[in-house]
Image (cartoon, rainbow, N blue to C red):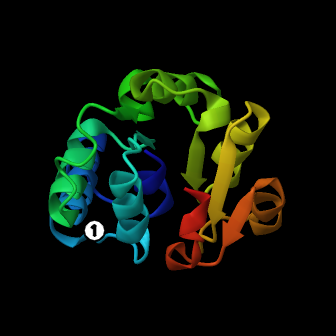
Amino acid sequence: RWMLETYNIAADEDQMYAQVWDEITHFYSEEVSLKPGIMPILDKLQRSGIRAGLLTATENGLLKHALRRVGLADYFGNDIVSCAELNLSKATAEPFMLITEKLNSTPEETIVFEDAFYAANTAKIHNFKVAAVYDLYEPHQDKLQNCANWYCRQWQDFPLEII
């Protein structure tokens, strides 16, 4: 409704929703790419015998497209929690606790890799270690950096010895 009214688009809400959803699906299926530096982190976890989970705000269907696109479709197995699917927010502890249950871990044993301040802050408040990375779209970089145990400007700069 906001887009229709703001941009004076001659379409109804259902048409607009379908068009936007098609574009988002196309992006996740055909364009999304793995951020540089992620694979060395995942490889180190795998070599060390440490399970990696995925806690995401993204809807499962889109996530599956993205994971397939970047070659990680089989990497996480069932160790995925989608906030969108569960109607949860990373601003609350619940999704973080759900992923620790899947990983048979505790907050104190778990490193959360995050680029959004609100989510990193939630993790930190609930005793998770936080490895944060700069993101162009995060308006609170100073807060993100201050709440993190480790902070880098890009994923490939993370010291792998933290794992």
Residue at x 40%, y 24% (from the top left corner)? 102
On the question of residue 55 being in view, the answer is: yes
73 is higher (above) or lower (below) than 32: above
Please state if 34 lies on the left or on the right of 64 as rendered. Answer: right
Q: How many marks?
A: 1
Q: Amino acid at mark 1?
A: Val
In the image shown, does 42 or 28 lie closer to the viewer? 42
x then y, percent, for residue 47: 34, 57
118 is higher (above) or lower (below) than 83: below
Please state if 110 lies on the left or on the right of 54 as rendered. Answer: right
In the image shown, does 59 or 146 lie closer to the viewer? 146
Give the quarter of the figure containing the N terminus: top left
SS of the residue under disc 1: loop
Q: Quadrant of residue 144?
A: bottom right
x then y, percent, for residue 15: 21, 47
158 is higher (above) or lower (below) than 3: below
Label 1: how many Cα within 10 Å (few below 14, some 14–19, many 20+): some
Residue at x 40%, y 40% (from the top left corner)? 53
x then y, percent, for residue 9: 34, 60
Give the quarter of the figure containing the C terminus: bottom right
On the question of residue 91 being in view, the answer is: no
Residue at x 32%, y 69% (from the top left corner)? 34
> Which residue is tagged 1?
32
